[in-house]
Image (cartoon, rainbow, N blue to C red):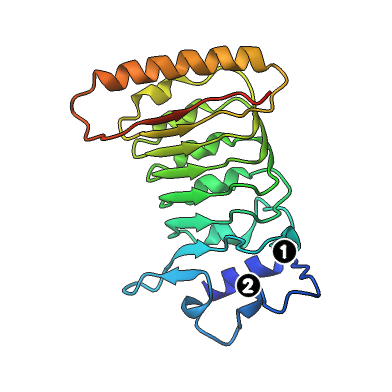
Amino acid sequence: MRNALWEFKSEFYVQRPDWMDSDTQTEKWRNNADCCSWDGVSCDPKTGHVVALDLWNNYFSYPNSLNGPLRSNSSLFKLQHLQNLDLTRNNLSGILPDSIGDLKYLKNLSLSDCNLFGKIPYSHGNLSSLTHLDLSFNDLTGEIPASMGNLNYLASLQLDFNKLSGNFPHVILNLSELTNIRLGRSRSRNKKKMMTSQLSWQNDWLKKRQGDFTTKRDEIVVRSEIQS
């Protein structure tokens, strides 16, 4: 595990401004120490497996974040027991690889504001334990993959501020745990068509939820604005 994390760190570079005297979390990692004690890393106390990686960039500028693409053969995908992965506000600047679907135990995946582009991988549908997915504030294009209809435990879906287009897969209507959807503020060229699709999808979803008396929802949040 330590080797996988160490390799993952080496896949990126960190350009820290001269005025900043504090290191990023990965700069504090030491190869001669237990990786479970590293900043941003959490392990299962019984098995020792890495179950959480929280490298959310909590600084004010991108130069102090991880810089570089998330490759399909990244050592990150060797951490097969990950349940929580938060790389929000890191400059990953590339496509989201299909390999993300190999992390089958993921419950929370946050890759917001990471300069990601390209399509959402169909392999997202393999993340059968996922409860929270945040890919907002990127440059993702294309349609939402119908494979997301396999995410039976998904409670929160945040895809706002992207360039998504096309119709939304109605199979997502069947996700009984889904209570928070953010799909709006699209920067798509065909905004009128997308708005029509979003409103139709939203209305159908709300109607279905209103007739579902087996769930324990106290509140349903839907946001589907279109950026002008």
Disc 2 + disc 1, Cβ < 8 Å:
yes
Dot 2: few (<14), some (14–19), or many (≥20) neighbours within 10 Å? Answer: many
x then y, percent, for residue 70: 67, 53
Q: Is 97 left or right of 172, judged from the image as shown?
A: right
Residue under the point 44% across and 50% down: 108
Residue under the point 64% across and 47% down: 113
Q: Nearer the viewer, residue 103 or 90?
A: 90
Residue under the point 65% across and 26% down: 227
Give, as a three-letter code, the residue at label 1: Phe
Give, as a three-letter code, the residue at label 2: Thr
Q: Is mark 1 on a helix, strand or loop?
A: loop
x then y, percent, for residue 63: 76, 62
Say which label, 2 or 1, has the lower sequence index: 1
Mark toward the viewer: 2 or 1 = 2
Residue under the point 66% across and 49% down: 114
Q: Nearer the viewer, residue 14 or 45?
A: 14
